[in-house]
Structures are given as C-alpha cells and as structure tokens.
Image (cartoon, rainbow, N blue to C red):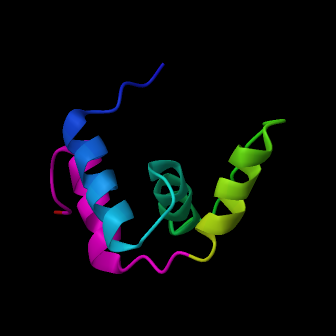
Amino acid sequence: MMIISSRCVIELAVVAEELNAGSIEQVVYAWVLRLPSQPLPIIGSGKIERVRAAVEAETLKMTRQQWFRIRKAALGYDVP
C-alpha cells in the first residue's frame, strides 16, 4: 500500500482549486493521463461517482508547471 505524503495532498488540493476540479481524485486522474507514457487508467469501480471523476478528469487543462509541481511534491525533489 502506498502512503501519500501530506505535501503531495496539499499540492493536489492547490491544483484542484486552481483548476476548479470537483475533487483531488480528478486531479490525480488528470495527472496520470498526462504522463509521457500515456497510460489508460483502469478504475475498476462499480461506483458511478468514480467513473464520473475519471471521465471529468479528461476536461481539466493542467499546465506543465502544475504537473511538475505535483511530481515534485510526490517525489520530494525536482527534475534534475
């Protein structure tokens, strides 16, 4: 089980506010969708709210700066 640092949660909340996202979950989906490898998240949920969050994440216009701020908060260091 992965434990998310408080600095990462704080940064996700800041970006969620900047993007007017409905939830931090949407920002996480948006971040994953913008990874260079272009993964397709498998949400595997029967909860319609989770499906909606994943679909709505597609509409978020995350900047590169926001993407890298989340990365830095998660890993604890900047891109070398």
Q: Position of residue 43 (x, y in %)?
A: 73, 43
Measured as percent of width and height from the top left, residue 21 is found at 47, 65
Instruction: Say whether residue 25 is left or right of residue 2.
Output: right
Residue 55 at x, y = what percent? 71, 64
Residue 53, picture quadrant: bottom right
Q: Quadrant of the C terminus?
A: bottom left
As for residue 63 lying within the magenta part, the answer is yes
38 vs 77: above or below = below
Residue 14 in view: yes
Q: Nearer the viewer, residue 35 or 8?
A: 8
Q: Is residue 39 magenta?
A: no
Residue drawn at 47 percent across, 61 percent down: 31
Residue drawn at the location 19% of the way across and 42% of the way down:
7
Residue 69 falls left or right of residue 34? left
Q: Is residue 42 visible?
A: no
How many numbered marks have been drawn onto this rendered protein structure? 0
Magenta segment boundaries in residue numbering: 60-79
- Residue at horizontal 54%, vertical 57%? 26
Q: Main secondary structure of the magenta part?
A: helix
Q: Give the residue at x 71% y 46%.
A: 49
Within the image, what quadrant is residue 69 found in? bottom left
Q: Residue furthest top?
A: 1
30 relative position to 75: left or right: right
Quadrant housing residue 14: bottom left
